[in-house]
Amino acid sequence: MSGVDGRGGRAPRYRLEYAWRTDRGVVRVHNEDAVLVDEGHGLLLVADGVGGANAGEVASQLAADVIARRVREQPPSRTNRDAATAFLAAAVQEANRQIWEASGSDAACRGMGTTVVVGYVGEGWLAHAHVGDSRLYRLRDGEVLQITRDHSFIQDVVDRGFFPSLAEARRYGVGQNLLTRALGSTGEIQVAVGAEGFAVGDIYLFCTDGLTNMIPDDWLRQLLGVADADLGGLADALVDLACERGGTDNITLAILRVGASR
Ligand SMILES: [Mn+2]
């Protein structure tokens, strides 16, 4: 089988591009976010750690390390997206256990935790899993869609109908920083998972709240919508804009762009 058209053979159907950045921002002394992109394994991950001293950094890096190790040791299926999402959920649960145990056994790490959002590229789809308020967005046909739903108090009050939107809840002073789920906060954690089929031109953006709290959705749409932009330049522009608009938190992102194979 020649696979020239990419449907029958082993030739890739899509050309994938990756870019990632992490930045301390303007205000914070430390960067407690972590980012990991492994193009060979089709893995993207960002995590936003919290905790005293350097414990937030420990937690977010531990999440990245544990999940990456599992994927590298025994790569999940690229053809069965249910198997891949189940694999990601198990990997995130394993990261949770290790962070929970480390925070119980090391006084310096007590109370540490982290968000995580992770993606895994299969044949024509992206499987994803998350805990906390780090997000996955997709840009398609000029529309920005937030794929993940935050595990946060402010999202909960919106879901319960007290406010029509996050923006409106913020306007009434509902704080954004209270998470309802985080890795390391309990021995067992519920992981949200999903999978998205690719279309040529899709851009997937994984990011921490240091980006989304600084950049309104319509600005995000504007930047991501510049077709054929250099992906590294796009990543730089997002970080620069978040810093320019205050940069009050660490800013971390990983981008996947789906192009046509040649
Ligand atoms: Mn943050």
Image (cartoon, grey):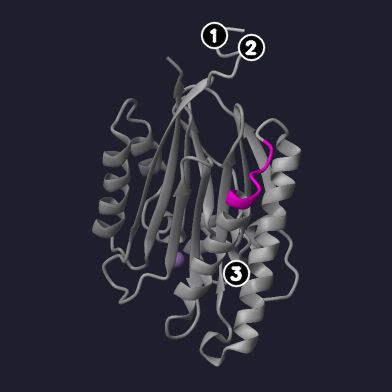
Q: Quadrant of residue 98?
A: bottom right
**Disc 1 packing (10 Å; few <14; some 14–19; many ≥20):** few
- In screen coordinates, is 89 left or right of 172? right
Q: Residue at x 46, y 41 (%)?
A: 39
Judging by the rendered image, the residue that carries numbered circle 3 is 179
Q: Which mark is residue 5?
A: 1
Q: CA distance from mark 3 to mark 2?
A: 45 Å
Amino acid type at circle 1 is Asp
Provide residue 240's location: percent of width, then percent of height.
Answer: 25, 52
Q: Residue at x 52, y 8 (%)?
A: 4
Q: Nearer the viewer, residue 255 or 1?
A: 1
Q: Are marks 2 and 1 in contact (CB under 8 Å)?
A: yes
Q: Nearer the viewer, residue 15 or 47?
A: 15
Judging by the rendered image, the residue that carries numbered circle 2 is 8
What SS does tag 1 mark? Answer: loop
**Disc 3 packing (10 Å; few <14; some 14–19; many ≥20):** some
Quadrant (top left/top right/bottom left/bottom right) for the C terminus: top left
Provide residue 67's location: percent of width, then percent of height.
Answer: 59, 57
Magenta stretch holds residue 73: yes
Q: Is residue 236 above or below residue 197?
A: below
Magenta residues, dominant SS class: loop
Amino acid type at circle 3 is Leu
Over which residues does the magenta segment extend? 72-77
Provide residue 235's location: percent of width, then percent of height.
Answer: 32, 45
Q: Nearer the viewer, mark 3 or mark 1?
A: 1
What SS does tag 3 mark? Answer: loop
